[in-house]
Amino acid sequence: MFVAGIDIGSLTAKAVILDQDARIVGQALTPTGAFSQRAGENAFEMALKMAGVHTSDIGYVLATGYGRKNIPFAHAEMTEISCHARGAHRLFPEARTVIDIGGQDSKAIALNESGVPVNFIMNDKCAAGCGRFLEVMARALETEVEKMGELSAHSTKTIQISSMCTVFAESEVVSAVANKCSRSDIINGIHQAIAKRVSIMVDHVGLVERVMMSGGVAKNTGVVRALESQLGTTLLVPEEPQLVGALGAAVIALERSRNMRPVEKSILLNQ
Amino acid sequence: METGKNYRKVEATGLISGIIKGFYDGVVQAPKEGKKVCWCVGAGPYELFKAQDIAHFQTENWAVAITARKMERPLVEEAERAGYSSDCCSYASINIGYALLQQKNKIPDILSPELRVPKPDFLFAINTCPSMAQWTEALREIFDVPALIMDVPLFYDDDDEVQYQRNILYAVEQLQDAVRFIEKITGRPYDWARLKEIHTYIKKASIVRREIFELWCHKPSALSYWDMAIALGAANVFRGTPEALAYFTAIRDEVAERIQKGIYSIPNEKHRLLWYMNHPWFKVGHLSKFFAAQNTVVVGGQYVVGPYSNPEKIQPDRPLWTIAEEHPTRPYVRTMEYKTDKFLKSLAQAFQVDGIVFHAPRTCRPNSWDHFDEGERIKKELGLPYIIIEADHSDPQFYSEAEVDNRLQAFIETLPERR
């Protein structure tokens, strides 16, 4: 029997399939779009194809992310706090603090030695500093999000981006461009602003080494460098930072499937 | 997946709808019956007006009825159009918006007939919450009617006996002025016998409510915070009647029977959380089911215990003293230390909770200014985790269900590991 974790985020839907030895045998990432249920189904099918298994081989599916309640084929759901913590622990058992910056959410999670969260904090009311924020900034600077890390590495001057609001921050960026500030300096300023907000959240839950970063923004080497500088540490960054939530959901799914009685397993497999 | 269908509401609480309808029908009909109408702003001594047969209602309770029926939007918008910040107390925005529309004869069609309260002949306010005075001044400007604003000292301290007595006397003097005003506006002597009768009913109900409170402490719980929220009006503006007494008696009897039969609010109660200060009135149904889906019962909560919760302090033969001992001593005029000890620590221990949810309403900073410090102190002294949820008590524009649900669920998921 295999298990699956599905993570429906604001920008992307992810799926991870594990075998009974907790090995990743399938994974997928696809845009969420306007229809989260369909995105979840697509991600699940893509991961199944990669694993070479069928839906009937999956004994337990756990969903997470904002769209988790909209996945009819999931057996249970848990918040991304629990799933990111477990996913981080699976990849880096030494991780005790997780920073996750996704499309519209940023969070700092303190976890124990078993990968269970013991404290957390999330951004409230405002998504400035998350993935969508970076998309808006990239557009304003006529570049791509993927190139921002590299561009910021050439920064020679610190520029303050002080606006809390994404839209007003875009105006600040436009006026910095008009004042002939270099794109590298502006992007570095944006990264520093994000790192500042997030490092305050980390302080709130208490930084305990080692610190891991997950979520799509972890692919931005500029944000990673800015965070490392502000926190005074080296971050653990997985190869696929966007899949940590789905991985954690799959890990929890595996545990639950192992704790089920045989008759319960049989009911699930035959559904 | 779990859907919260396992939440077991205390059925007797549903009787409140009859009480609410009867009460507001009386208010709406008052001008036709030649009765004076008073709008009461704040948790005040409504019995003063009830005794003299003055139609009255509490503007906050009325705003709760409006928002629970999802009729608040046009009223809030009218207040904002008139220049009131959306950060103003949302009870006030709803009520002031209504007043403005009423003066223009433009009450929105969406408003239920029984909630179309008549214009006031006078206003009464008690400033235990600092917004009350400004709110009442706004209404006075709109309606050009007399306003009695009862002042209470900020930060009431029970320990200083001399100051305490002085504060009571200060309140009594103002209540005496209010009685003189009531006699003048109604053109007849004050009905002290009727006031005594009302206080007698309040006292009897208070004894029953204390029994309910003691039953509430039972673990597992046969009564939830959401049941008590529904019942709050009967301890507040609807109090002092045989109906309110019968209402609480029915609740007490049902809860006692549930405990005897092992019927609890959450069949598989795994977690117990204390809810601190007010709550989103327009989400009581949703939150009761949401927490049930997490096998979590919400208990304690000073806000829903309501006024006159100590029957020994209710002396029907000393009505103004009784009122003066009760009304100026509401939570908002208590120090942070007092609130942490009495409303958090003792309740958390009495109810044996696993954590605390602080509701920080966007439009009520007097409610939430000290939440972080209170939470940190309880975490240190009792080892209890807490979460602060930012929402609002009556304006849904400040409530994000996905955000609130997500954070609460994540908090509950971390509970077993935190203690």
Image (cartoon, coloured by chain):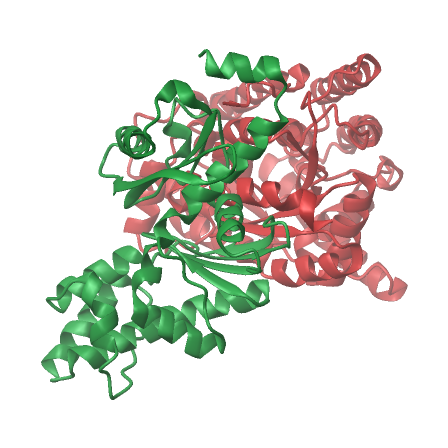
Chain colours: A green, B red
Q: Is residue A30 left or right of residue B11?
A: left
User: Residue B281, position in %: x, y?
Assistant: 52, 35
User: Residue A106, position in %: x, y?
Assistant: 41, 57
B45 or B390: nearer the viewer: B390
Total marks in image:
0
Q: Is residue A115 left or right of residue A4?
A: right
Q: State the residue at coordinates (29%, 35%).
A: A50
Q: Is residue B249 left or right of residue A93?
A: right
Farthest bottom residue in view: A156
Q: Quadrant of residue A195?
A: bottom left
Residue B400 visible here: no
A157 or B405: nearer the viewer: A157
Q: Is residue A107 left or right of residue B386?
A: left
Q: Is residue A177 above or below residue B327?
A: below
Q: Quadrant of residue A163?
A: bottom left
Q: Is residue B158 above or below residue A208?
A: above
Residue B303 visible here: yes
Q: State the residue at coordinates (26%, 28%).
A: A38
User: Residue A217, position in %: x, y?
Assistant: 33, 60
B168 or A226: nearer the viewer: A226
B403 or A262: nearer the viewer: A262
Q: State the residue at coordinates (53%, 19%).
A: B21
